Amino acid sequence: LDRDTGRQTLDLLFGLASRSGHALVIVTHDTEVAARCGRVLTLDGGVMLPLSPDRSR
């Protein structure tokens, strides 16, 4: 997806998840997308890194 279409798609997905009360799981390498999420888990070489204190990252 181009940047604008990707943003519109994420807006739609976040809105649907919020209105329905469901969780939304996103896998991305895009830090701007990750910044929109309430919780970010990071994998490095297949190993989950500890959460950092800010925003449960």
Image (cartoon, grey):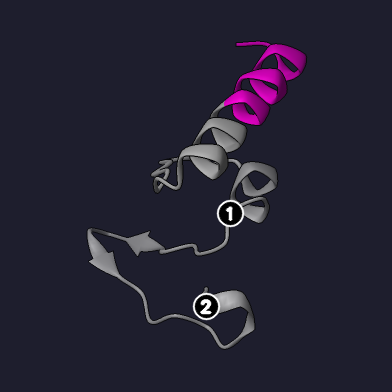
- Per the rendering, the mark at residue 56 is 2
Please indicate whether residue 25 sits to the left or right of residue 56 in the image.
left
* Total marks placed: 2
Crowding at mark 2 (Cα within 10 Å: few <14, some 14-19, many 20+): few
Nearer to the camera, 48 or 13: 13
In the rendered view, tell whether residue 41 sits above or below residue 30: below
Q: What residue type is labelled 2?
A: Ser
For marks 2 and 1, the one nearer the N-term is 1
State the image coordinates of residue 37 (x, y, percent, origin top left): 58, 54
Instruction: Tell whether label 1 touches label 2 (CB within 8 Å).
Output: no
Main SS type for the magenta part? helix
Q: Residue at x 29, y 69 (%)?
A: 48
Crowding at mark 1 (Cα within 10 Å: few <14, some 14-19, many 20+): some
Q: What residue type is labelled 1?
A: Cys
Q: Residue at x 48, y 40 (%)?
A: 28
In the rendered view, tell whether residue 2 sits above or below residue 14: above
Specify whether residue 9 is painted magenta: yes
Q: Residue at x 42, y 43 (%)?
A: 24
State the image coordinates of residue 2 (x, y, percent, origin top left): 68, 11
In the rendered view, tell whether residue 43 sits above or below residue 2: below
Specify whether residue 40 is painted magenta: no
**Span highlighted in magenta in the image:** 1-12
State the image coordinates of residue 16 (x, y, percent, origin top left): 53, 31
In three-dimensional space, the C-alpha distance between marks 2 and 1, rounded to whole angstroms, equals: 10 Å
Quadrant of the frame with the N terminus: top right
Q: Which residue lies furthest to the left in this view?
A: 46
- Per the rendering, the mark at residue 37 is 1
Please indicate whether residue 27 sits to the left or right of residue 17 in the image.
left
Please indicate whether residue 5 sits to the left or right of residue 47 in the image.
right
Q: Is mark 1 on a helix, strand or loop?
A: loop
